[in-house]
């Protein structure tokens, strides 16, 4: 018998699963919670084989709840349910240690099959998808590293100049706003382009925007 805790505030889904699984000899819903924090506490107390976790909970998302759960019970299998999983959501789930995702639109039987597979220690995400998600994680890490490096590299004045460039000010406008000579402004702009490895002010603004260096 595979014991399942459901953490979801969708009462219709819970009723549907409860009704359908009454005919499944190997599945039993042993607990239900509508919030992440209560669901974590419930799962830690009941120690089911699988936790079915909604991705959109009232107090946190499924990945955050999974992280909290695995901090106390790292051996529990978690399957996260959502309408349409995004790459970022799936990546967060994998990093939190979930067995995978199941779409709520797939129907009752696929959810039951996902529970059985997760209880058996299987991963529910294809190897190709995992590889793509890991590449996404590496790209995110590179962006964060670049952002951190550039934040340290840009001086306060250069950051101010970069923000004003993004707002559309030209050299004369920058000079007037900052009460600087146009020669000094050009020196700041040249330093910004060098640090961002940009060939133009527009490219610098685009790169800075991608790295969340400007608003």
Image (cartoon, rainbow, N blue to C red):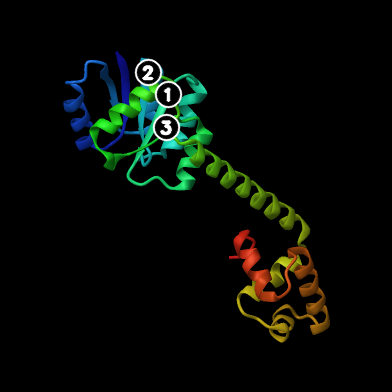
C-alpha separation, residue under disc 2 versus residue under disc 3? 15 Å
Position of 131 compared to 146: left or right? Answer: left
| Residue to which mark 2 is pinned | 49
Position of 144 compared to 190: left or right? Answer: left
Position of 79 compared to 127: left or right? Answer: left
| 174 in relation to 23, above or below | below
Dot 2: element: loop
Q: Is residue 33 visible?
A: no
- Quick one: which residue is furthest to the top in this view? 1
The residue carrying pointer 2 sits among few (fewer than 14), some (14 to 19) or many (20 or more) residues within 10 Å by Cα, namely many
Q: Which mark is residue 129?
A: none
Residue at horizontal 24%, vertical 33%? 108
Dot 1: element: strand
| Residue to which mark 3 is pinned | 124
Q: Which mark is residue 77?
A: 1
Q: Earlier in the sequence, mark 1 or mark 2?
A: 2
Q: Say which quarter of the image contains residue 7.
A: top left
Please state the horizontal and vertical placement of residue 142, each as a whole percent of the image: 67, 49
Position of 16 compared to 191: left or right? Answer: left
Observer-nearest of 63 and 127? 127
Dot 3: element: loop
The residue carrying pointer 1 sits among few (fewer than 14), some (14 to 19) or many (20 or more) residues within 10 Å by Cα, namely many
Please state the horizontal and vertical placement of residue 6, each as a whole percent of the image: 31, 28
- Quick one: which residue is furthest to the front in this view? 128
| 69 in relation to 90, above or below | above
């Amino acid at each position: 018998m595979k014991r399942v805790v459901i953490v979801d505030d969708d009462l219709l889904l819970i009723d549907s699963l409860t009704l359908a699984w009454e005919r499944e000899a190997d599945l039993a819903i042993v607990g239900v919670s509508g919030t992440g924090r209560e669901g974590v506490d419930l799962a830690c107390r009941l120690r089911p084989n699988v936790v079915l976790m909604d991705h959109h909970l009232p107090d946190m998302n499924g990945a955050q709840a999974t992280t909290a759960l695995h901090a106390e019970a790292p051996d529990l299998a978690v399957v996260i349910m959502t309408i349409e999983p995004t790459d970022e959501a799936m990546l967060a789930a994998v990093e939190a240690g979930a067995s995978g995702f199941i779409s709520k639109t797939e129907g009752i039987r696929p959810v039951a099959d996902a529970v059985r597979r997760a209880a058996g220690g299987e991963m529910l995400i294809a190897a190709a998808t995992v590889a793509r998600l890991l590449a996404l994680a590496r790209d995110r890490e590179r962006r964060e590293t670049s952002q951190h490096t550039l934040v340290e590299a840009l001086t306060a004045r250069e950051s101010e100049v970069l923000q004003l460039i993004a707002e559309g000010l030209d050299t004369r406008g920058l000079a007037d706003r900052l009460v600087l000579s146009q020669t000094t402004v050009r020196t700041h702009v040249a330093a910004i382009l060098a640090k961002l490895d940009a060939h133009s002010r527009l490219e610098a603004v685009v790169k800075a925007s991608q790295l969340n260096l400007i608003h």
